[in-house]
Amino acid sequence: MSEEFPTPQLLDELEDAQDVATPNKKRGLSSNRVLKDIFAGTIGGVAQVLVGQPFDTTKVRLQTATTRTTTMEVLRDLVKNEGVFAFYKGALTPLLGVGICVSVQFGVNEAMKRFFQNYNASRNPNMSSQDVDLSRSNTLPLSQYYVCGLTGGVVNSFLASPIEQIRIRLQTQTSNGGDREFKGPWDCIKKLKAQGGLMRGLFPTMIRAGHGLGTYFLVYEALMAKEIGTGLTRNEIPPWKLCLFGAFSGTMLWLTVYPLDVVKSIIQNDDLRKPKYKNSISSVAKTIYAKEGIRAFFKGFGPTMVRSAPVNGATFVTFELVMRFLGEE
């Protein structure tokens, strides 16, 4: 990540902003709340992987195919040549990693929301610091929701970029025998690190995750705020609506960043010894456009959009229900 978003300093500053008024009480509440955010995000991430991995494997195979192919051809070839478990190739890394990534996304997003709640209250001369409403039912301006999500995306990119590269390289291996390049996640990590390629694709990941998650949380929180505006608390919004709002938010995310995700996948799947592309967004975009036209930027778009609704619906409803189970201050 960039120097503008150093994770430890960011979280320290956010907690400090919350602790000014009543240090002992608020510090305990803040620490407890951060742990809940992280735990709920982790469980949401596990749900995301279990639901989404088959869709993601199909998407990556389509994005990185060297010849023109269709979704049905990819599905048929996967089952015929590699078996049904091929859909979960590389699943161990995201199962461990995505749980952490989603916990960071949601944890930073929630911390930023509390930061803005304090900031907004500090600009109100009629409100004392003891009166600040840090509950999750306290809504913010839409622009601040975007910044909350963007910050979570940028912070998370340092984790997401290597995890996604490992998953992509394992998913695109077609051999199941001893001649395969990577024997598993740890072997992939060692070989990428030895070749200096573990963080390849970090910059496009940061742009995609920053804008994508900014849009993601903006849309979700806008829908939640509309419900809260009817007089409901956040905990009273029914699970089916949480799932629906999450599904719609995930769809909007991919509509805004999909072409960049294609470029990122190609960069991260390129041969490290004899790369076909320069490690830059513009170079890859120009090359694939010259070769295949605009349709190159939408390879795998169908499976991604089909995947997006159930995956993100499951992620948000799981996060919210776990938060309710744990209880909120």
Image (cartoon, helix red, strand yellow):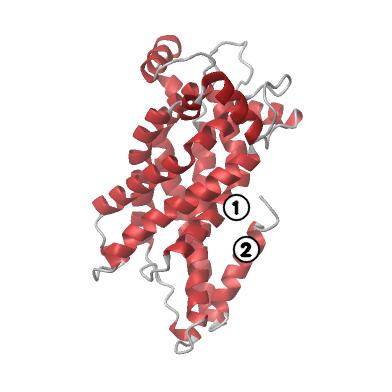
Residue at left offset 32%, top offset 51%: 245
211 above or below 146?
above
50 above or below 237?
above
For the residues bearing labels 2 and 1, Cβ distance under 8 angstroms: yes
Residue 232: percent from the left, percent from the top?
A: 25, 68
Q: In the picture provided, is 265 more to the left or to the right than 305?
A: right
- Looking at the picture, tell me which residue is in the foreground, 172 or 96: 172
Q: Callout 1 environment at 10 Å: few (<14), some (14 to 19), or many (20+)?
A: many
Q: For residue 88, say whether it is visible.
A: no
Residue at left offset 67%, top offset 58%: 4
- Looking at the picture, tell me which residue is in the foreground, 280 or 271: 280
Alpha carbons under labels 2 and 1: distance apart: 10 Å
Instruction: Indicate the secondary structure of the residue bearing disc 2.
Output: helix
Residue 47 lies in quadrant: top left
Residue 172: percent from the left, percent from the top?
A: 54, 21
14 above or below 190?
below
Q: Label 1 amino acid? A: Val
Q: Callout 2 environment at 10 Å: few (<14), some (14 to 19), or many (20+)?
A: some
Residue marked by disc 1: 155
Quarter of the image for the C terminus: give it.
Answer: bottom left
Q: In the picture provided, is 173 more to the left or to the right than 124?
A: right
Label count reads 2
Residue 223: percent from the left, percent from the top?
A: 32, 58
Instruction: Indicate the secondary structure of the residue bearing disc 1.
Output: helix
Residue marked by disc 2: 10
Residue 296: percent from the left, percent from the top?
A: 50, 25
Q: Label 2 amino acid? A: Leu
Q: In the picture provided, is 20 more to the left or to the right than 321?
A: right
Q: For residue 80, say whether it is visible.
A: yes
Residue at left offset 47%, top offset 36%: 258
**Mark 2 or mark 1: whose residue is earlier in sequence:** 2
